[in-house]
Image: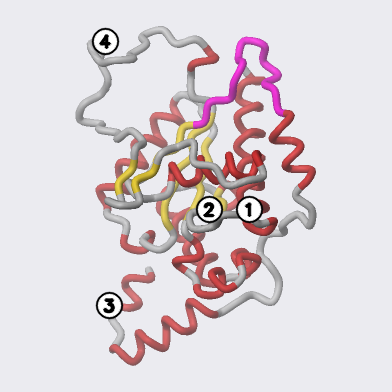
């Protein structure tokens, strides 16, 4: 929808629309955020699976290269450690990622390293999280979208709960870059969420906006709040899935 709007407009119209889209704010946030992160932080730190067959909650991050999957892992770790960490390697020089690539045309076989034909419950994925970048989401290719839909269908067939995380909100929205508290007041980001929800079929209340820690050397309460809200919902969904088993 956003691409069509710009395609049919003149250059001055495009510039005017950009100003409106990237700067317009709702008077009130369309999603309430906690005033204090401590409850969500305590919940995440103290979580233990209620199903005794699982020692860990396994969350699979799925998304295009450069979406911010490794950065999100680092950001979660930074929030929990209350300091900036770099446990999941990212390659800032070449813009590539150290996370694994998914190739549906070449599914894993018994000859692949690490292939497990009979995983235990503790070794299976309990939550699928689709990760996409806000700054390039409007021009995400159909190939990538279809690949993500295929993965979602497979997860749905297995009963695995699913959420989505939209990263790089500060790069997509000027108001969010100025103040991360504007993330859920941004009309542009709300439109991105609505369109992404319609495209992939993920409910809006299962889509979370986050800003990863990339250039910062200290954590920030407002950035933490976004990450913790997404993390808590992942844990809740995953624990419900384990408990139902």
> Which of label 3 and label 1 is nearer to you?
1
In the displayed structure, 158 sits above or below 148; it is: above
> Which of label 4 and label 3 is nearer to you?
4
Name the main secondary structure of what is drawn in magenta.
loop
Crowding around mark 2 (Cα neighbors within 10 Å: few <14, some 14 to 19, many 20+) is many
**Dot 3: element:** helix
Which of the two labelled residues, at mark 3 and mark 2, occupies the earlier sequence position? Answer: 3
Give whichever of 186, 91 is nearer the camera.
91
Structural distance between the alpha carbons of marks 4 and 2:
38 Å
Residue 174's spot in the image, x, y percent?
50, 74
Side of 195 where 145 appears, left or right = left
Q: Verify CB contact (< 8 Å) between mark 3 and mark 2.
A: no
> Which of label 3 and label 2 is nearer to you?
2
Quarter occupied by residue 190: bottom right
Which of the two labelled residues, at mark 3 and mark 1, occupies the earlier sequence position? Answer: 3
Residue 101's spot in the image, x, y percent?
29, 35
Q: Which residue is mark 3?
A: 7
Q: Which residue is mark 4?
A: 110
Which of the two labelled residues, at mark 4 and mark 3, occupies the earlier sequence position? Answer: 3
Q: Which residue is mark 2?
A: 213
Q: Verify CB contact (< 8 Å) between mark 4 and mark 1.
A: no
Query: Which mark is on residue 219?
Result: 1
């Amino acid at each position: 929808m956003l691409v069509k709007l710009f395609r049919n407009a003149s250059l001055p119209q495009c510039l005017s629309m950009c100003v409106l889209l990237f700067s317009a704010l709702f008077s009130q946030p369309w999603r309430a955020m906690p005033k204090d992160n401590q409850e969500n932080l305590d919940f995440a730190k103290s979580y233990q699976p209620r199903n005794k067959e699982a020692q860990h909650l396994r969350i699979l991050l799925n998304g295009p290269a450069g979406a911010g999957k490794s950065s999100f892992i680092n950001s979660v770790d930074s929030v929990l450690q209350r300091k900036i960490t770099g446990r999941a390697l990212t390659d800032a020089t070449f813009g590539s990622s150290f996370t694994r690539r998914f190739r549906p045309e070449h599914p894993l076989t018994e000859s692949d390293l690490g292939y497990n034909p009979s995983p235990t419950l503790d070794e299976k994925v309990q939550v699928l999280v689709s990760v996409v970048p806000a700054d390039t989401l409007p021009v995400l290719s159909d190939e990538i979208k279809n690949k993500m839909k295929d993965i979602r269908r497979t997860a749905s067939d297995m009963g695995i709960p699913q959420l989505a995380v939209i990263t790089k909100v500060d790069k997509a929205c000027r108001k969010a870059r100025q103040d991360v508290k504007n993330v859920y007041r941004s009309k542009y980001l709300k439109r991105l969420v609505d369109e992404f929800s319609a495209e992939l079929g993920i409910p809006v209340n299962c889509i979370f906006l986050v800003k990863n820690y990339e250039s910062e050397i200290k954590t920030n309460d407002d950035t933490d709040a976004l990450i913790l809200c997404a993390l808590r919902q992942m844990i809740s969904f995953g624990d419900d899935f384990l408990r139902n088993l």
